[in-house]
Image (cartoon, rainbow, N blue to C red):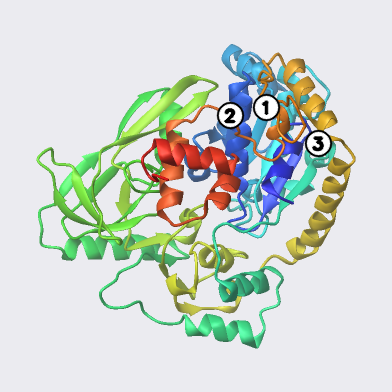
């Protein structure tokens, strides 16, 4: 399934499970959907299963959004207490679309409780109280975990609430992160649990240290290894240490949630020579979440100056992470968007794209850890594996069986979509917006072309979701970054959901092309 097809289905108002391999464009598709809904005044809640994932998408954890906290069951008195929270009731009542990202790491019991709360507070017997729910994620990645003494965690799709929601499966089949054929064959082999001798040869060729003049982030399975390496490396530097403390503003529990989920630490210790990684996207400044570099100096304002692997020098100012409820900011934190990057855990790397990484997968203990780590990089030239064990190349046997079912279900979703004419699809999209009190985007007339006469924005947006939409600063940053990465205009158009002509026009306006 293409991103455009998935977007069409999302805009119909159905419950959806959006999945696909790492790099297939799940986050991009959701961002397109979110922007579409916000332009038409539809209230959408963006949540994730973990704090780290929530900071990646600018949302809050599903636990905070629903008010359940760490609970995986609710007694009647506890449910009554939630019903008495006016602000929580108002939040759930006004929400019309609920996105839950990184669904692979959400326990089935938690999903059931969220459904129960939505039904109760919205006073509706419909699944999730009638909210359109969009589950996003890849079950081949890290699974849910349970604390010691708890019942074993189960995948979210085992929840009766998942079955009641009956989400349409949208399995994205395009690949936008990796373009290396050998590398893709390795990832596909791991994903299918068919790691042949030929694929092991590919992986074994990557069993080496990187060149001496380069130092890439190291991925480990355990926190203890990461903390030890980062501390040792920083202390070994003789330069003066600079300390940057995080600021917070707003709801205190949400501030704490943001702090726990933020990849930048609450207290950041830096020295000249320290290896660092950016923890947030800022296309205009020239970095993204996962960009690697080294502290070269500190400015007159005591801000760190980072030299990236591409020899760019960036003075790094503090940025904000926030939790929003619609357009209202509930809490925010501010910190230098850096972290020490001699090492990070595989868990914290999920959702990142790294130019290169050195991986010690000898301590892998969970299904999917090796797959998540290896799929963080773009190609084999950026993959350095120190060691790996058998578990590192294993994926969950339950998910192997599920994957084939999901692909078949996704094909059926496409077949059902194709039964509708373009006009019928436009009408469904429009009716969904109107039924939720939104304001459909106006139909505009264009000069006749090929005898077609007048056509609408909605018609063009079947294949180009952002056509004729106003350019935001974030989109312009993405455009600059994509163009500077030598990506073809037609491929940029696909990624940004716009027409190739619109991409060219904007590039000219930005002064990036002159002809």
Q: Nearer the viewer, residue 176 or 408?
A: 176
Q: Residues within 10 Å of mark 1 (few under 14, many from 20)?
A: many
- Residue 60, position as x, y percentages in the image: 53, 33
Q: Nearer the viewer, residue 364 or 324?
A: 324
Left or right placement of residue 416 versus residue 359 in this view = right
Q: Measure the C-alpha gap from mark 1 to mark 2.
A: 7 Å
Mark earlier in primary sequence (1, 2): 1
From this view, report whether residue 102 is shown above or below residue 486: above
Nearer the camera: disc 3 or disc 2: 2
Disc number placed over residue 379 in the picture, else none = none
Instruction: Write the residue at 10% across / 53% down.
Output: 240
Q: Nearer the viewer, residue 433 or 158?
A: 433
Q: Which residue is mark 1?
A: 457
Pointers 3 and 2 in contact (C-beta within 8 Å): no
Can I make out residue 2 in this image? yes
Q: Secondary structure at mark 2?
A: loop
Q: Which residue is mark 3?
A: 165
Q: Residues within 10 Å of mark 2 (few under 14, many from 20)?
A: some
Instruction: Write the residue at 75% across / 21% down.
Output: 120
Q: Residues within 10 Å of mark 3 (few under 14, many from 20)?
A: many
- Quarter-of-image position of residue 99: top right
Image quarter hosting the C terminus: top left
Can I make out residue 394 in this image? no
From this view, report whether residue 202 is shown above or below residue 35: below
From this view, report whether residue 392 is shown above or below residue 151: below
Mark earlier in primary sequence (3, 2): 3
């Amino acid at each position: 399934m293409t991103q455009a097809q998935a977007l069409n289905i999302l805009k119909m108002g159905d419950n959806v499970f959006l999945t696909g391999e790492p790099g297939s464009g799940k986050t991009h598709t959701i961002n397109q959907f979110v922007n579409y809904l916000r332009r038409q005044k539809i209230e959408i809640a963006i949540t994730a299963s973990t704090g780290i994932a929530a900071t990646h998408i600018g949302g809050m954890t599903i636990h905070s959004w629903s008010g359940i906290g760490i609970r995986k069951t609710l007694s009647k008195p506890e449910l009554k207490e939630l019903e008495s929270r006016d602000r929580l009731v108002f939040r759930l009542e006004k929400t019309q679309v609920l996105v839950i990202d990184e669904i692979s790491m959400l326990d089935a019991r938690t999903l059931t409780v969220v459904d129960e709360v939505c039904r109760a507070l919205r006073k509706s017997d419909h699944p999730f109280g009638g909210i359109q729910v969009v589950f996003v994620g890849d079950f081949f990645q890290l699974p849910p975990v349970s604390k010691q003494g708890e019942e074993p965690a189960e995948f979210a799709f085992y929840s009766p609430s998942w079955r009641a929601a009956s989400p349409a499966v949208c399995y994205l089949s395009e690949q936008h992160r990796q373009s290396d054929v050998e590398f893709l064959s390795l990832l596909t082999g791991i994903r299918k649990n068919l790691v042949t001798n030929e694929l092991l040869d590919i992986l074994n060729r990557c069993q080496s240290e990187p060149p001496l003049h380069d130092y890439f982030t190291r991925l480990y399975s355990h926190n203890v290894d990461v903390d030890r390496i980062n501390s040792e490396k920083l202390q070994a530097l003789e330069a003066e240490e600079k300390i940057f403390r995080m600021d917070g503003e707003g709801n205190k529990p949400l501030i704490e949630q943001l702090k726990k989920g933020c990849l930048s630490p609450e207290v950041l210790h830096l020295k000249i020579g320290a290896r660092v990684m950016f923890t947030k996207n800022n296309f205009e400044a020239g970095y993204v979440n996962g960009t690697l570099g080294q502290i070269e100096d500190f400015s007159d304002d005591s801000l760190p100056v980072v030299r990236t692997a591409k020899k760019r020098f960036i003075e790094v100012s503090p940025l904000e992470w926030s939790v929003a409820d619609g357009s209202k900011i509930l809490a925010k934190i501010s910190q230098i968007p850096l972290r020490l990057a001699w090492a990070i855990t595989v868990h914290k790397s999920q959702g990142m794209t790294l130019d290169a990484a050195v991986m010690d997968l000898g301590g892998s203990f969970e299904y999917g850890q090796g797959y998540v780590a290896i799929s963080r990089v773009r190609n084999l030239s950026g993959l350095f594996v120190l060691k790996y064990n058998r578990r590192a190349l294993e994926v969950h046997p339950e998910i192997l069986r599920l994957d084939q079912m999901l692909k078949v279900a996704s094909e059926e979703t496409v077949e059902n979509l194709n039964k509708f004419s373009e006009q019928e699809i436009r009408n469904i999209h429009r009716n969904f917006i109107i039924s939720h009190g939104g304001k459909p985007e106006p139909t505009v007339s264009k000069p006749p072309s090929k005898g077609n006469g007048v056509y609408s924005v909605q018609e063009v947006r079947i294949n180009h979701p952002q056509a004729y939409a106003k350019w935001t600063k974030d989109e312009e940053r993405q455009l600059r970054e994509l163009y500077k990465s030598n990506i073809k205009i037609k491929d940029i158009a696909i990624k940004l959901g716009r027409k190739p002509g619109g991409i060219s026009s904007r590039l000219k306006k930005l002064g990036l092309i002159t002809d």
